[in-house]
Image (cartoon, helix red, strand yellow):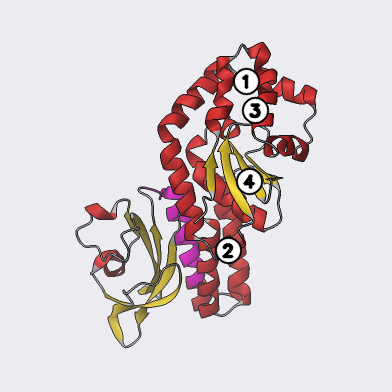
Amino acid sequence: MRSIVQNIADDFFELLRYDKKDWYSYWKVYRERHKPIIENYEKALNLAEEQIKALLLQFRRPMVDALMQYWHEKSRDQKLYCSKLISHRHELFELSKEDFSIVLTGLLGVKDWAVVDGDSEKVILIDLVALYEKGIIDRVCEVAFQSVKSFRDGKMSGDYISKQDLFEDLLNQIEEILKRADLNESMKRICELLYGNVAYYDWVGFYLVDENKKDELILGPFVGEPTEHVRIPFGKGICGQAAARGTTFIVQDVSKETNYLSCSPKVKSEIVVPIRLAGEIYGELDIDSHILEPFDEKDDRFLNAICEKISRKMRGDKEWS
């Protein structure tokens, strides 16, 4: 399989070998070394020679040095996770087309990512400088995810969308889904929406209480790898515990959870949020992630808000009529 993600940042960091007054001279070397993508990056963002010189002069040497030190420590893991993150959603991102690649490198800090023409395919450039100066360098993989999705939606450059802004937008879309579709179709489309927009939501699904066996969950709509756990008794595993307790259950590291039903060795963490109807547990929304400790209070509030909206639809509240 071809390599989707490349890392050429070391070539950018050679800036540090030169006096600052010579950084533009080195930039021209860097541009020549990575034909045609750096030149096409300049064209895509309408950057004239004087603008490029001015942007380079704004760089602080300690910033570039600190970024280099950070990237030398983290680049291998970040590149590997970026590759896994994109490859895992091969159908969503249409990887069979083989029409794009991702390049991680230092650029001019103008945009977090930009799509340019390469030799034979589109190249999505992720600007480590822009991410570092915004304090989101640890979000490289999320930026890569968002950039690929945006590229497939026809966008050619952009900036990282914060979790809060992303969740607010998704909640608005979910409200529209619940207004226009029946419950089962709504759940299916919610799964697709979350899986397709939140980088670390690697499996998204609903479990519903069996109408004939009130102490057992059955698998409903889901997106992600198939699971053998199509029926789960209350109290068993994370889903069963959340149903039995009637509360949100967050496990940031499943290897430390003794009562855990393993679906895949890829799963590192999980969050389960109950759906209540007339004071009883109707079902739950289950999210698996392939990274450790990805969930925070924003995920908790967001997923609980989704489940409350589903509950209101089931109750027939006027909001959804």
Pointer 3 or 2: first along the chain: 3
Q: State the separation of the CA atoms marked 1 and 4.
A: 23 Å
Q: Is residue 279 magenta?
A: no
Q: Counting other residues with Cα less than 10 Å from the Cα at mark 3, is it few (<14), some (14-19), or many (20 or more)?
A: some
Identify the residue under disc 4: 124
Q: Amino acid at mark 4?
A: Ile
Secondary structure under the numbered disc 1 in the rendered image? loop
Res 319 seen here: no
Pointer 1 and pointer 4: residues touching (CB < 8 Å)? no
Identify the residue under disc 2: 96
Q: Amino acid at mark 1?
A: Phe
Task: Describe residue 102's horizontal placement relative to residue 247 as left or right.
Answer: right
Identify the residue under disc 1: 59
Q: Residue shown at 49%/26% (left/top)?
A: 68
Between residue 286 and residue 127, name the one nearer to us.
Answer: 127
Between residue 311 and residue 78, name the one nearer to us.
Answer: 78
Q: Amino acid at mark 3?
A: Tyr
Task: Describe residue 246's horizontal placement relative to residue 110 as left or right.
Answer: left
Q: State the separation of the CA atoms marked 1 and 2.
A: 39 Å
Q: Which residues are magenta?
A: 293-310
Secondary structure under the numbered disc 3 in the rendered image? helix
Q: Residue shown at 67%/14% (left/top)?
A: 22
Location of the C terminus (image quadrant): bottom right
Which mark is nearer the camera, 1 or 3?
3
Q: Position of residue 34 (x, y in %)?
A: 65, 35
